[in-house]
Structures are given as structure tokens and as C-alpha cells.
Amino acid sequence: MDPVSREHSGKAPLLFELKSNSLDDGPGIRTVVFFKGCPLDCVWCHNPESKRVSVELSHDRGRCIGCGHCVEVCPEGAITLEGAVTIQRHRCTLCMSCVDGCPSGAMGRVGFAMSPGEVVRTVMRDKPFFDNSGGGVTFSGGEPTMHLDYAAELAGLLQAQGIHVLLETCGLFPYGRFSELLLPHLDAVYFDLKLFEDSAHRAYCGASNRPILENLGRLADAAGHSKLTLLARTPLVPGITDTDRNLLGIAGFLRQCGITKAALLPYNPLWHDKGRSIGIEPHSLLLDAQKGFMSPTHVEHCRELFRSMGIDV
Ligand code: SF4
Ligand code: SF4
């Protein structure tokens, strides 16, 4: 059977974007498949529309022209327009009438289903760019490993087309099923390690980091015996993850695992507006320090800490 035409047999998870021409999600020019749903709940999440597995309604204030058509078409009376559009989300049934009726595209549906075969057919249009740049497809989210059967089927189809497949992961997944189903189809894994102390990880990410540390150790071992590229990444969140204590703890753990290369990702506060568009206000644990960009001097200080522990960043 043609691997591209083979359809996914089970229920497909929701995706929220297929993004072409990305230069930030792995080597070369890449198409990024964004999955919905994540087992963590990081207070600084840059993709808040990825957290829930289900469909959501978004409203982009910047695109809204204030015409009031959404107010008229909503059967639940869930939308008001007094200066600006307000959605009473507890009344919304996600019928999407307002999305269909919005003339400016300000109202949007977040989440769509595609079979693995459909995704492959779509990304194959970008294959010339992959081939010319050393790029490929990146699975991101959300957390792709929440949908292991689907992700494995999609990665296998892409692999059969000679496409480089990279997984971006929060690291919280059942290692046995992951290594059996998905790992054989991956060329690279970008593995996020945010907080080294378990109590801090529970407070800011909503779960223990013990399984994440274990998974990183096992994956580092697997990478040492295969061609898999493994990159550990730490997002720098001012006052939370960018402390000397946390960074030195993470760097020490990476050395224990035999990992000598990592990436530090400077904080980007622009996600706040994305969250508001789907009704999520910035978390109360986020302080003024997390509302702006980081200074280049502080980012360099963080990098120096990693280098002092023998980690190349
Ligand atoms: S999705 Fe339907 S119920 Fe929800 S606000 Fe829009 S029109 Fe109203
Ligand atoms: S229909 Fe669209 S543009 Fe008009 S008020 Fe509603 S969200 Fe804004």
C-alpha cells in the first residue's frame, strides 16, 4: 500500500496548526505539526492554545472591526459588544456560528482533525525546501507524545518518504510505549528540562519532574547507541527558571547523563495576548519580571553558567 495514502485507523487527535517555513524548530527549513493537549501546565506556556485537547474559540482583538455580527448570530447570547467584544465562555456551546459569520477573521476555531495521510500529503508540498536546506518536519505542541499511536503512524509515513522527523517534547511520557512506537521513526528529539527541583516543578508546571528526568537519562543512553540527535533545552523564565541554582542543577544533571550540548531559550512575553484570545489570563504566579524581554547580558550570564559546567550552549 502507498504509505502516503494509508489512513489512520484510530481517532485522530486535534492539531492546531501546520506551519510551513519555520527556521526555529530544528535544522533547515521545517514544517511544524502542532498537537493539542499537554500533560503539564506551565504558568509561562508560550502556546496556551495547545494546552487543552479539545476545540476552543479564539477572538483576536487586533483583527476585530467591532461590526457586532457575532453578537447577532450567537444563539446562546454569549457575546456582548460594549466597546470591545466579550465572550461569556460558560455560555458558549462552540457552535462556531460566530466564526462562520465574522467578516474580519477575528473569531477563530482552534483545533482541527487530520489523518496522518492527510498531514503527509500536505507537508509533501514543502519537500523541495526540506531537501535543499537539510530540513524536515517537527512535531510540537502541546505534547505530541500524548497521542503516541497517531504520532508514530505519522512519523513512520514521513520516514518512508525520506523526511527528517524531529520531536519537541516536555519529556513526560510512558517511556516503554514511546521507545517501542515512536522512537524508531525519529531522527532528533528536542527535550525540554525546565526546573531541576521537584517542588518547584510541581508548583510551576503542575507535575513532578521525576519521570521527566528518568526519561531524559534513558533517552541520552539510547542516543549514545544510535544516530538519534538529542538536544536538551531550558526555557529561561525570569525569576523562575533562570536562577543560578536551577541552571547549575540542570547542567549538573545533564553532565550525569553524558549530555554536553544544550540550548537556552530566552523568554518571550508576546504569548500573553495569545492566551487572552482564548480566555486565559496570565497566571497569578507570573510577576512583573515575566512581562518583558530578558536583557542580552543576563542571557549571556545564563549561558556562561552552563559553559562553566562543561555544557556547550
Ligand atoms: S461558538 Fe457559538 S455559542 Fe460560542 S460564542 Fe460563538 S456563536 Fe456563541
Ligand atoms: S463579527 Fe468579528 S469583526 Fe465583527 S464584532 Fe464580532 S469578532 Fe469583531
Image (spheres, rainbow, N blue to C red):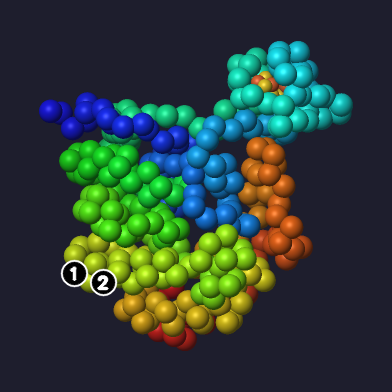
144, above or below 225, in the image: above
222, above or below 98, in the image: below
CB contact under 8 Å: marks 2 and 1: yes
Residue ID for mark 1: 225
Residue ID for mark 2: 221
Ligand 2, by image quadrant, is top right
306, above or below 207, in the image: below
Front in this rendered view, residue 46 or 73: 73
Q: Residues within 10 Å of mark 1 (few under 14, many from 20)?
A: few
User: Is the N terminus in the top left, top right, bottom left or bottom right quadrant?
Assistant: top left
Q: Residue at x 29, y 39 (%)?
A: 154
Q: Residue at x 40, y 54 (%)?
A: 168
The percent coordinates of residue 267 (x first, y second) are 60, 61
User: Is the C terminus in the top left, top right, bottom left or bottom right quadrant?
Assistant: bottom left
The Cα–Cα distance between marks 2 and 1, rounded to whole angstroms, is 7 Å
Front in this rendered view, residue 25 or 134: 25
Secondary structure, mark 1, is: loop
The percent coordinates of residue 255 (x first, y second) are 37, 81
User: As drawn, which residue projects farthest toward the bottom?
Assistant: 308
Residue type marked 1: His
Q: Is residue 237 visible?
A: no
Residue type marked 2: Asp
Q: Is residue 159 left or right of residue 146?
A: left
Quadrant assignment, res 253: bottom left
Q: Residue at x 49, y 52 (%)?
A: 39
Q: Residue at x 76, y 63 (%)?
A: 288
Q: Residues within 10 Å of mark 2 (few under 14, many from 20)?
A: some
